[in-house]
Amino acid sequence: MKSSIHNLNKAFENKIRLGIMSILSVNSSASFNHLKEVLEVTDGNLASHLKSLENSGYITVIKRFKNRKPNTTYEITPAGTAAFETHLNALEQLLKQL
């Protein structure tokens, strides 16, 4: 029997990335400032984790202007939704095995 641990996604091992995906999985989008505030991280730290998730194809970046000011928001992609659900299911199965 294959252990559920093999279904855990390395991209979500970090608590900040796990937090980003959690927020985006229950919201249609979130701004950089909202993510920064909720996760209580620095600009640079958040930016590096967002870039990693973007490079993995799990989130997409939307850059717009709001009242002539740049506004960056993030959305989870279909691939990100599927990968995150698989990760959460693996965690749940691991807990059931204990």
Image: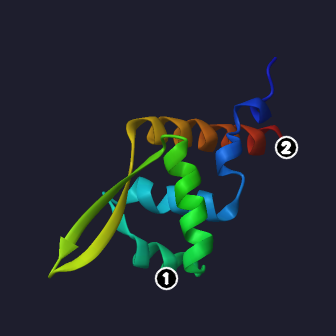
Position of residue 28 in the picture relative to residue 55 (left or right): left
User: What is the crowding at mark 2: few (fewer than 14 residues within 10 Å), some, or many (at least 20)?
Assistant: few
Looking at the image, residue 60 lies above or below residue 56: below
Q: Position of residue 79 (x, y in %)?
A: 45, 35
Closer to the camera in the image, 94 or 65: 65
Identify the amino acid type marked 1.
Answer: Glu
Residue 98 tag number: 2
Residue under circle 1? 37
Residue ranking furthest to the top: 1
Closer to the camera in the image, 78 or 92: 78
Q: Quadrant of residue 83?
A: top right
Question: Sequence-wise, which precedes: disc 1 or disc 2?
Answer: 1
Position of residue 27 in the picture relative to residue 97 (left or right): left
Q: Is mark 1 on a helix, strand or loop?
A: helix
Identify the amino acid type marked 2.
Answer: Leu
Looking at the image, residue 42 lies above or below residue 2: below
